[in-house]
């Protein structure tokens, strides 16, 4: 029996009543923080962030109320995709440090009660991984570890097996001289795809999880899971073409075909169920807090829900909720926001926990996508919704994208294509070094150079300065973390609605506890509402518990419920003056 089930049962037995109470597991109201290690903190002056750097600033994560951090990969890699091309799944890349550095990081994190979540990249390895090299050499153990195909002959000329395209542009098939076959790579040609139909591959990957569990990690973020399986080959060993989408006239472009055979195959969520079982087995033997899986899948929402699990198997606790990333933009109105949030509640299977994501190392920064005036708005929204929040490093201080010239661009998603249009393909602008202070290189490194340029605004936008500015993004973020500890925000019911086209409201209430209402003015008009017209059973008066630099009210000020005014782009959190 899990600790949680045990608590429920004991409580029921003790009360002798049908009270439903379930102690929450640590991750269910966690505030997660994604660290992109290359860019977080450099300890050795080489201009690239590293593990000792992360360890040195773990107290900062504590300061900003973080429960757990998932780190993008720091394992052995030729860095063709900056660590998402792994050549050894159980070793640390020297660029980031050593295994001892990793162990020190985990020890320090445990001291501070911060959970460490590893990025697990099961879909592909590097072409420099020993497994791939052996596979290419037809080593009997490894020969079917990857997806190989001899290709087809057209007019005597060898061609790739079919029209599949890589996410990073061009055919998804790469000819391999030694093996005299093509291999599949859904991303860069230096990232060959594993063959998950081979049980040996599954076991190898299961062992990777076991290795890191032994090292003390608290869970994994699973990379690109929807690419794990491709359609099975037909009886002649061939893979069908994907249908042309009509969205692009360039057959090399990922959008040229509809991906019905290379992503979202029905078997894929079952892999996650298998991995969750490995975590549970580990817990059963070693005890400790629940280990978690975060799942990255850019799939239609009904498919995403399969990753939570089903009646017979648990899946990942946190299938990333990308609704707000995928479906909102600068012009979205309050009804769109409400719809995107409520969609998750509508689709989520009973008993599961929602999560909220607004950015990561693959997307433009929030302030660039939605406007700098909406940075606090999204932090407030993420941290006052129920369930867990996931913040990408730098969003708490309001970092924005940095323009990077074509010559300085390093992201394969941009470099594999021509210069024209690179700015919207490149992910570099959201990956620049973290801005710690107003000193040289923003306090990120003591070295002279940094792997990507430092933002020009670093003297204004940095941790040190923002600590001292009452209503800085950073202090608002910290204030939110305090509010989040209240019973209502931890356990309360939630009602999300647009009050008109411009203002979004999130009401959180819990029995006789205080009620909290988040109001977000997405646009630049002054708005006034009688909240009684929108929500039932509200008391006559509310108090401001969180304001931003757009507010003319102060924290502690009161407002009649019948007339709440919002300034342009103002976001606030109100608390009922009395328990309701
Ligand atoms: C998703 C990761 O977030 C991205 O950065 C990477 O390029 C691809 N998966 C391939 O691993
Ligand atoms: Mg370094």
Image (tube, grey):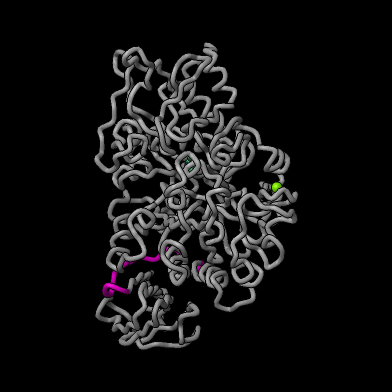
On screen, residue 71 versus residue 578, left or right, reads: right
Is residue 32 in sight in this rendering? no
Q: Is residue 72 above or below residue 272?
A: below
On screen, residue 299 versus residue 444, left or right, reads: left
Q: Is residue 488 above or below residue 428?
A: below
Name the spot of residue 257 as percent of width and height, x first. 29, 36
**Quadrant holding the C terminus:** bottom left
Q: Which residue is rendered at x = 37% and y = 35% of the image?
A: 252
- Could you tell me how many numbered marks the image carries? 0
Q: Which residue is rendered at x = 58% and y = 78% of the image?
A: 470
Name the spot of residue 411 as percent of width and height, x first. 52, 44
Q: Is residue 307 above or below residue 434?
A: above
On screen, residue 212 versus residue 484, left or right, reads: right
Q: Which residue is rendered at x = 73% and y = 40% of the image?
A: 100
Q: Is residue 202 above or below residue 225?
A: above
The quarter of the picture where residue 466 lies is: bottom right
Q: Is residue 235 magenta?
A: no
Name the spot of residue 413 as percent of width and height, x first. 47, 42
Name the spot of residue 443 as percent of width and height, x first. 70, 61
Q: Which residues are magenta?
A: 485-502
- Between 133 and 347, the residue placed more toward the observer is 133
Q: Is residue 489 magenta?
A: yes
């Amino acid at each position: 029996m899990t600790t949680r089930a045990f608590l429920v049962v004991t409580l029921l037995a003790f009360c002798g009543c049908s009270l439903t109470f379930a102690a929450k597991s640590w991750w269910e109201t966690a505030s997660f923080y994604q660290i992109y290690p290359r860019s977080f903190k450099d300890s050795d002056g080489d201009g690239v962030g590293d593990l000792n750097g992360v360890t040195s600033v773990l107290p900062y994560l504590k300061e900003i109320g973080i429960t757990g951090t998932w780190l993008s990969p720091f394992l052995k890699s030729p860095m063709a995709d900056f660590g998402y091309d792994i050549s050894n799944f159980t070793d640390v890349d020297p660029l980031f440090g050593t295994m001892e550095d990793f162990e020190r990081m985990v020890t320090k994190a445990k001291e501070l009660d911060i959970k460490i979540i590893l990025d697990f990249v099961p879909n592909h390895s590097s072409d420099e991984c020993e497994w791939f090299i052996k596979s290419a050499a037809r080593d009997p153990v490894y020969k079917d570890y990857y997806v190989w195909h001899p290709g087809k002959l057209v007019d005597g000329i060898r061609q790739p097996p079919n029209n599949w395209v890589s996410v990073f542009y061009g055919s998804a098939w790469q000819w391999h001289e030694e093996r005299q076959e093509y291999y599949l790579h859904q991303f860069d040609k230096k990232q060959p795809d594993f063959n998950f139909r081979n049980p040996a591959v599954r076991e190898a990957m299961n062992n990777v999880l076991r290795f890191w569990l032994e090292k003390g990690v608290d869970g994994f973020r699973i990379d690109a899971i929807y690419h794990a399986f491709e359609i099975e080959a037909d009886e002649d060993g061939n893979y069908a073409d994907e249908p042309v989408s009509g969205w692009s006239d360039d057959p090399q472009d990922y959008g040229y075909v509809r991906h019905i055979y290379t992503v979202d195959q029905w078997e894929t969520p079952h892999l996650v169920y298998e991995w969750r079982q490995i975590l549970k087995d580990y817990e059963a033997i070693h005890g400790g807090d629940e280990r978690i899986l975060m799942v990255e899948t850019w799939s239609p929402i009904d498919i995403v829900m399969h990753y939570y699990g089903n009646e017979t198997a648990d899946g990942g606790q946190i299938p990333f909720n990308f609704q707000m990333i995928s479906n909102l933009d600068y012009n979205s109105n309050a009804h769109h926001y409400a719809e995107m949030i409520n969609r998750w509640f509508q689709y989520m299977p009973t008993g599961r926990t929602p999560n909220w994501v607004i950015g990561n190392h693959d997307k433009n920064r929030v302030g660039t996508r939605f406007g700098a005036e909406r940075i606090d708005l999204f932090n407030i929204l993420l941290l006052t919704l129920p369930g867990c929040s996931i913040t990408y490093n730098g969003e708490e201080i309001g970092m924005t994208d940095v323009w990077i010239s074509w010559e300085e661009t390093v992201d394969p998603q941009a470099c594999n294509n021509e210069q024209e249009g690179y700015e919207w393909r490149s992910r570099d602008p959201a990956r620049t070094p973290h801005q710690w202070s107003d000193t040289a290189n923003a306090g990120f490194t003591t070295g002279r150079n940094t792997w990507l340029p430092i933002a020009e605004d670093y003297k204004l936008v940095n941790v040190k300065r923002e600590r001292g500015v009452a209503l800085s993004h950073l202090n608002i973020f910290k204030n939110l973390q305090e509010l989040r500890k209240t019973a209502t925000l931890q356990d309360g019911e939630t009602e999300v609605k647009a009050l008109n086209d411009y203002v979004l409201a999130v009401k959180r209430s819990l029995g006789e506890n205080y009620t909290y209402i988040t109001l977000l003015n997405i646009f630049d008009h002054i708005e006034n509402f009688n909240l009684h017209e929108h929500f039932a059973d509200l008391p006559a008066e509310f108090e401001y518990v969180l304001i931003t630099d757009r507010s003319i009210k102060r924290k502690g000020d009161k407002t009649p419920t019948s007339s709440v005014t919002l300034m342009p782009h103002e976001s606030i959190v109100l608390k009922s003056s009395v328990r309701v």
